[in-house]
Every structure is written in structure tokens, then in C-alpha cells.
Amino acid sequence: MNILKKSFYLILCLYSTINIAQERFLIKNVTLFNGEKIIPNTSILIQDDKILKIGNNISKVTTIIDGTGKFLMPAMINAHVHAWSSVSLKQAAQSGVLNVLDMHGVEPMQKQMKSTNDSTNYARYYVAGYAATAPEGHGTQFGFPLPTLKEPKDAVSFVQGRVNAGVDYIKIIVEPWKPTISHETAKALIDEAHKHHKKAVVHVSRVEDGYQVLKNNADGLVHIWDDAPITEERLQELSKNKDFFVIPTLLTITKIKRLYIKKTEDEFKTFDKFLINEVKRLYNAGITILAGTDPPNANINYGTDLFKELELLSQASLPNIEILKAATANTADRFGLENIGYIKEGFKADLVLLDKNPIEDIKHISSINTVWKAGQKVQLK
Ligand SMILES: [Zn+2]
């Protein structure tokens, strides 16, 4: 064996050893949130990229991680981002956010960014492609060309274009601060998305628009409205007749208003309370609330800032277990993301191990000890 061959062989052996050490391991005596409920003092066996077994009768494992006093949960999902480069996906992964849902971006660039979906140190990237908006409408101000819609019949080719680009869902913008599509066009887009078995999610900022698009069968809103409270009558009507979710992005709206509107801090605090109260009313009416932060708007980051949104959801009176679902299982369910969002046998081993229990205090979500993506340790900062 010549030197070159020898060193190659050595590297190969070393590489295999590292992999073998990661391939099968047990996290023992840990408090588990499996996406549905808390299971105290249990063990989880990981084999390759999957969760193989959960329970306390697991033997023949050499690599054991002691989870005593620790908390294990599914890796998180940020349900509203705009990621303009892979650096953002890396930042998300380092905070245990292993899946991000992009709500408007450049399709060829997004396709390229999906190439790191199976890389350990990057969050998986789900996309809407270009959002549906009017000529000169909100979403056209970023300087990249995109197809726009003038009337309902444009919905067919618009949605087909996104489907051809391989998007995961359709995003629609109804935003009257700039020229906007009509509710007829929004409805045509929602119907067309559903024909292609895609979810249709909508950006609104006014309660009236939120009400109209939900009546027209939108699957979800990507912001809470910020102009006025929804009437109790309309809230009851929607919650009884429609099945939808809201990604309130409380952190984003409270921050953006402070950047662009002149008000006293007391007035802002009253506004914050109004937003939080709207989320509380939606939650109490049985509507699913999902966690998202809309980075890089208002300089929000792709990782740890999601924890701030979770704290705001806590202020909106969501129980801590429901907040964890808002950042994991409920988002996976609502967007049809397969094999993630839960710690279940057969699911991807996407795990976050915390030093402290976030059921006791949601702030403990930041006590990250280890993150695994598909059974491999994510390199933390
Ligand atoms: Zn957004």
C-alpha cells in the first residue's frame, strides 16, 4: 500500500468510526415531549436517521446519553421566514429550528437553497416561491421581478407556475397599503391552490381582509390583523364553520410598528396588548396558533428570536405545552410536513435536548444542550 492509499484508507476508517458512533444511541431517563404529551422518565433509541423505539425496555446499546433532569422535544419549525441565503438556514439549525417555511422569495435561488435540506447543519427549507400579489403590490418592492395578478382568471397560470417551480404551498398577499389583488382574485387563487392539493396561506393586516379570505377557505393567515378587533359574532362564525390556523408573528408586528410609526411607548404598549388579546381570543375560540417570526424583517434572526415569539404566545395565555405544539407538531400537521414535528417511532430523529423544562417556564426553551438532525449532532455555536 503506498502512502497515498494508506492515508486514504485511514481517513475512510476514521470517517466510518465517527458515523458508527452516531448511528445507534439511546437517550435515557429523560422527560419527553413527543409532540402531543409529556412522558416523564423515558428512553429513546435512535438508529441511523430515525427514532427506532421509545420506552424503558431497550437493551444492547453501547452509546448512552444520560437525560436525567433534562427535557427532550422535537426540533422546532419556524412557520414564517424569508431566507435569502443558506447562512440563515445554518443560524436556524443552531437554535434547534430545523425547519423553516419561506413565505416569499426568488424561486431559482430557493431551489438551490433546498440542496442543503439533508445536510446536518442546515434547517430544511420549505417554500411558497413567489407570493401572489398585484402589479406594484406589496412584495414587489424588493427589486426582483415576479409574476403578478390583475384579475381572477390570472390565478390558473399563477398557481401552475408555482407548482411547476416545485413550491410546497401557495402564499397570497392582500395588503391595501399598496395596490392589492381583489378578494375575488384571492378566492380564485385559494381554489386553484386546493385543486393542486396545495395549502393557501394569506398575508393580511386588516381584520376585514382576514375575515373575507378565511370565509373564502384560506388555510391560514401568516400574520394577525393589527387594525381592529374581530367582532365576537364573526369570530364565532369563523371558528364554527372553518378550519384554519393563524401564524400571528407578534414579535414582528410589535417591532415593525416601532420602526415605522410614531407613537409614545405607552401607546405602543396598548397596541401590543391589543395584538396579544386578539391571539388569546382566537386560541380560546379553538383556532390553531402557529409560531413564526418573519425574519429578516425588523432585524429578527432565524434562530433564537423564535423563543421570543413563544414568550409572547405565553402572554396570550396559551399553555406552555400548546406553545411547544405551535412550534412543532401543529405546524407539521397543518402544512402536511411528513415525519417531523413529533418524537414517534419511525419519525426522523430531529431532536432538541434542553437542560431545563419549558413546561415549567417557557423561557427554558433557550437552555439548549444538544440538537440532532436526522440522528446527527448539529454543530452549535
Ligand atoms: Zn413575511
Image (cartoon, rainbow, N blue to C red):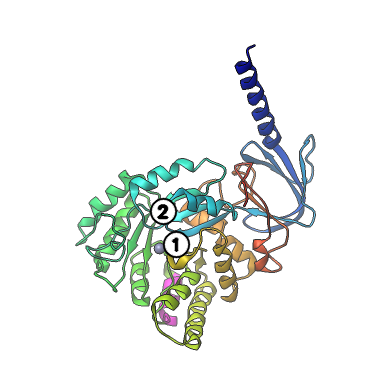
Question: In the image, which residues are magenta?
Answer: 229-240
Q: Is residue 307 left or right of residue 295?
A: right
Dot 2: what SS? loop
Residue 98 shows in the view: no
Q: Report which residue position mark 2 lands on.
A: 84
Q: Find residue 87 and name its label.
A: none
Q: Residue 89: give x, y in percent of width and height.
A: 50, 51
Question: Residue 7 versus residue 139: which sits nearer the camera?
Answer: 7
Is 274 or 20 nearer to us in this picture? 20
Rate crowding at label 1 as few (under 14), some (14 to 19) or many (20 or more) other CA atoms within 10 Å: some
For the residue labelled by badge 1, is the local secondary structure a helix, a strand or a loop?
loop
The picture quadrant for ligand 1 comes to bottom left
Identify the residue position indicated by label 1 in the image: 296
Q: Position of residue 99 (x, y in %)?
A: 52, 52
The disc labelled 1 sits on which kind of residue?
Pro
Cα separation, mark 1 vs mark 2, equals 9 Å
107 with respect to 365 (left or right): left
Compared across the picture, whether 359 is left or right of 123 comes to: right
Residue plotted at (52% across, 63% down): 291
